[in-house]
Image (cartoon, rainbow, N blue to C red):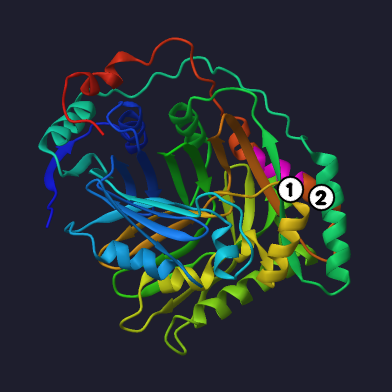
Amino acid sequence: MIHYRTAVTETGHEPLDTAVALAESGLFGTYVVFENAGGWCVAGGIVAEVVVTADSVRCTWQGSTTEEPWYGDPLAKVQQFLDALPVAGWAAYGWCAFELAYAVTGMPLAGGVLLHLVVPETEVVLDGGRALLRSIHSGTLSAVENVIARAEAPARPARRTVEVDLDANAGAYRGAVTSVVSDIRAGALHKAVLSRVVPVDAELDFPASYAAGRRANTPARSFLLRMGDLQCFGFSPETVVEVDATGRVSSQPLAGTRALTGDADTDRRLREDLLADPKELHEHAISVKVAVDELAGPCKPDTVVVEEYMTVKERGSVQHLASRVVGRMPEGAGPWDAFAAVFPAVTASGVPKRPAYEAIRQYEPEPRGPYAGTVMRVTQDGGMDAALVLRSVYAQGGRTWLRAGAGVVEHSRPERELEETREKLRCVAHTLVARAESPAEPLRLAAAADGRSHC
């Protein structure tokens, strides 16, 4: 059994600055920064890795890989592999693609990763002015302490502006909305969330862009990751599912949107309009109903309740109608049971889900990948925190892009849904930072350059 070495150190800086310093340090080829309600976590390096593809689940541990085919539901095998890891008190971090939903429902799949989790070599939990460190290597533990001790709150130089065309693919999107409205009126479904892709024609500094964007946003969760050939950061407006060690389950559907401008009178008027709009109220109500029905599956009878209903949450450049549905699972059930019941989020797919998947596949230009999937943290004691991947930036395969969607129902208007995607894109588009041509700042690389353990 492997045990982590632990340490506690004072940081003296904001958690965001410390997390970004660790991401930029060069210590870790693979890392995940994850901000949740309890604080900030930074996971670096790889002890073990679990990857789900269209036909297999693969676990790599200490240089040895076990690969098994899956049939029906790959999540049971994911849980089996994680449970078998001889790592005391492990926590796994990673992401899953929206297309994992297609796999579970038996729809045909193309290639690509559906879920990617790592148990990190090193984990840092930032709690107020302290950093709780643990690592399987004492050398890496010392190097992390060195980065934290020497890091400074980053200067904010003049922004290296990145121009993004928020109207990219606008005509095709209007046409797709029109087609889905026709399908809804024909009785094929009640709602589909349609998204569009907006390219970014610049190489971004992902940690700097994440830091700038986080200062401008008020997310439920935020994240920054580099795993394999995927880089991603984002400001999640809601959680798909939260599970604690006692079996309490929570989901937070957000549906219904208006802009948030920063002008108090304008924002109040938009909020009143949101709360009086029959289309938005209907869209939100059916999403909450689905969340209740889905949580009823893995939870004990009569424990599922709507704890919060149709409040307004501010999320960066937009404001949403928000609700929270909670329940309690019976003894013997685990977090993956809850995840399987609610994934993907109804607020990023549609109602009913299977017809919505068909509409998404038909009318969207390419697979979603991490968009509308999750970034998550899973713990050995049965905890799970799965954030919905929206308001995010992606880089993979030599391209960088944004993506945003809107819920389409019977009374949707193409121009309004297009404008909603613009409102959401502004959460990230206005704080992008281009990569500098000069080398990275030496302080952040000092710990990585001193010959200590790297991943």
**Could you tell me the amino acid type at mark 1?**
Glu
The numbered mark at residue 416 is: 2
Find out whether residue 99 is within the magenta segment: no
Q: Quadrant of the C terminus?
A: top left
Of residues 390 and 81, which is closer to you in this image? 81
Q: In the displayed structure, would residue 426 be above or below residue 375? A: above
Tell me the crowding category of disc 2: few under 14, some 14 to 19, or many 20 or more residues within 10 angstroms, Cα based.
Answer: few
Q: Do we see residue 260 in this rendering?
A: no
Residue at 47%, 89% in the rendered image = 302
Of residues 396 and 204, which is closer to you in this image? 396
Q: Is residue 207 left or right of residue 410?
A: left
Residue 424 coordinates in the image, percent (x, y): 66, 44
Residue 43 coordinates in the image, percent (x, y): 30, 43
Q: Quadrant of the N terminus?
A: bottom left
Residue at the bottom extreme of this rendering: 301
Q: Is residue 176 left or right of residue 241?
A: right
Residue 374 coordinates in the image, percent (x, y): 49, 54
User: Which of the 4 image quadrants contains residue 373?
Assistant: bottom right
Determine the main secondary structure of the stretch shown in magenta: helix
Residue at the top extreme of this rendering: 438
Q: Is residue 373 left or right of residue 446?
A: right
Q: Do we see residue 196 in this rendering?
A: yes
Chain part drawn in magenta: 419-425
The residue carrying mark 1 is 420
Find out whether residue 421 is within the magenta segment: yes
- The reply to whether callout 1 and callout 2 are in contact (CB within 8 Å) is yes
Numbered-mark total: 2
